[in-house]
Image (cartoon, rainbow, N blue to C red):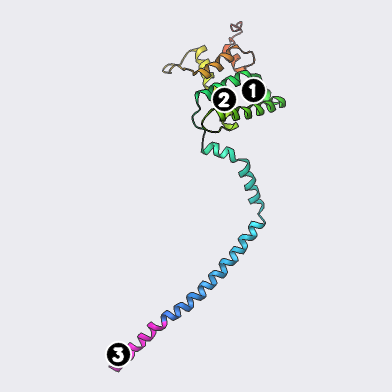
Amino acid sequence: MDDCFESGRKHDFEDDEHPAFSNVKQEDTDEANFSSTEGDLELDMSAIERPSPNMRKFKAMRAGCYSNYFQREFPAGRFLKKELEYIAKTYCDNYKTFYYSTVNGGKDKDSIARKKALLLEMAEHVSKLGDEPRTVEQIEQKIRDEMKRVKKYLIAKKHGRPNGKREIVLSTPQQMIADMIEKTTLEPFRQRIYEPSNGEDSAAG
């Protein structure tokens, strides 16, 4: 009986003592964690004050690629008809500038500079025409897309459609570009389409 009583008292004492012991240990642990966190904070602040070369490089890359990143992640919305008509007309009116900026590996620096200024002007104007702002990169990509379809149309027009291929129907702006290419003497692609092979005389004017 006494042994049971003493055992019970001992058990009660241990139960009472254990929470107090835990609290002391927890306080020590909290203090240690706080000190560790404070030290980490000092290190972090030091890193912020003196950014590493890799961090500076990353920030520079991020700033330089900002517009390209959003162009990839958030492509341009659908262009309105009036936007496409303006792009096509401006492209046709300034075709020599676009042509000489790419011919011979893009060595004509003056044409390249004029092209950049023209694309900027086009982007600003198109942004006012539509419902959303347009970037230079988006305008340039739209011109590439339109030219790609126009050239497919001209090839099919000259050589016929492959079996099973549907007829390519151009929009009004695309047809404007196609008509200009058919008349120009600059477009090298035009030569590949219209110049006869095997030494035949040229049939295109």
Relative depth, front residue between 154 and 30? 30
Q: Are marks 1 and 3 in contact (CB under 8 Å)?
A: no
Give the amino acid at mark 1. Phe
Q: CA distance from mark 1 to mark 3?
A: 101 Å
Q: Nearer the viewer, mark 1 or mark 3?
A: 1
Q: Position of residue 170 (x, y in %)?
A: 49, 18
Secondary structure found at label 1? helix
Mark 3 crowdedness (10 Å alpha carbons): few <14, some 14-19, many ≥20: few
Q: Earlier in the sequence, mark 1 or mark 3?
A: 3
Q: Which residue is mark 2?
A: 143
Give the amino acid at mark 3. Cys
Secondary structure found at label 2? helix
Q: Earlier in the sequence, mark 1 or mark 2?
A: 1
Give the amino acid at mark 2. Ile
Q: Which residue is mark 1?
A: 98
Q: CA distance from mark 1 to mark 2?
A: 10 Å
Q: Give the residue drawn at x 32%, y 87%.
A: 8
Q: Which residue is mark 3?
A: 4
Q: CA distance from mark 3 to mark 2?
A: 95 Å
Q: Give the residue drawn at x 50%, y 15%.
A: 156
Secondary structure found at label 3? helix
Q: Position of residue 138 (x, y in %)?
A: 56, 31
Main SS, magenta residues: helix
| Residue 193 sits inside the magenta stretch | no
Boundaries of the magenta span: 1-17
Q: Are marks 1 and 2 in contact (CB under 8 Å)?
A: yes
Q: Earlier in the sequence, mark 3 or mark 2?
A: 3
Q: Position of residue 84 (x, y in %)?
A: 53, 23
